[in-house]
Amino acid sequence: MIEARRLHRRFGDVVAVDEVSFVAKDRAITGLLGPNGAGKTTTLRMLYTLIAPDRGDVLVDGEPARADVRATRAKLGVLPDACAVYPRLTARENIRYFGELQGLGGDALERRLDELVVSLDMRGIENRRAAGFSNGERRKVAIARALVHSPQNVILDEPTNGLDVMSTRGIREQVRRLKEQGRCVIFSSHVMQEVTALCDHIVVIAKGRVVADGTPEELRALGGHENLEDAFVKIIGSDQGLEA
């Protein structure tokens, strides 16, 4: 479980995140939505300890993230907005390296690599050097790196960006499996079809604040539209909030 408690972050004179609070539960997919510049990416970076909040706290599995950052990161699997890979390493070597950083090794790590190669449909690229990979191929490697240590909590920022239709379907199935395994998943996407299909709970951020927090059905009711995208546009254009 990941909990944000009144997170606040300023960059110079700009308040990027202002008193953001929400809970992402285990066995659920929590969508984090917001227009460009809303503070969504800054919020995600605070959740996975890349930057520290000026005020407020992040709790991971009930423990303050800043109390032991290294231990917190071991509980997290993160796909950030930027998906750089080591170009001279193969896809499998990239993933293996991150598994070793998490303390994995030997036959157990190799079996885990085999599982990820199959589940993310990387058999055609696993032994190719990453130099020259397409955006979608790099994204698959980055997702595998995030999942290699089987973390309880997974944060995915635009996981299907740049992927073709079949790869996108595979990623969605992988996200559903994470939920079935009892994990906490935070899922950020601009594709409302994905959000509608996957998310149990949605948090909407606009102008650095939470303006809606509830189930997809509750957000549709709040926005006054059956279509989630239309409801989202209505919500971010208002100052109303939703108490779930």
Image (spheres, grey):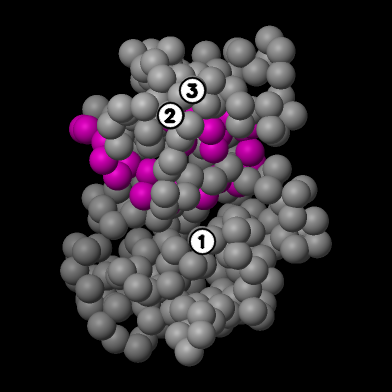
- Residues in magenta? 141-165
What residue is rendered at 43% in x and 12% in y?
127
Q: Quadrant of the N terminus?
A: bottom right
Note whether 226 is above or below 135 in the view shown: below
Q: Earlier in the sequence, mark 1 or mark 3?
A: 1
Residue 185 is left or right of residue 158, and the answer is: right
Q: Which residue is mark 3?
A: 89
User: What mark, if any, has residue 87 been given in the picture?
Assistant: 2
- The vertical placement of 79 against 178, above or below, is below
Q: Which residue does the image show at 48% across and 72% down from the upper left?
A: 244
- Give coordinates of residue 50: x percent, y percent: 60, 58
Question: Which callout, 1 or 3, points to the residue nearer the camera?
Answer: 3
Q: Secondary structure at mark 3?
A: loop
The residue depicted at 22 percent of the width and 33 percent of the height is 164
Mark 1: secondary structure: helix
Above or below 45: residue 187: above
Neighbour tally class for label 1: few under 14, some 14-19, many 20 plus, Cα within 10 Å: many
Q: Which is nearer the eye, 214 or 13?
A: 13
- The span from disc 1 to disc 3 (Cα, nearest Å) is 28 Å
Whole-percent x and y of residue 198? 37, 46
Q: Is residue 61 toward the left or the right of residue 234 in the image?
A: right
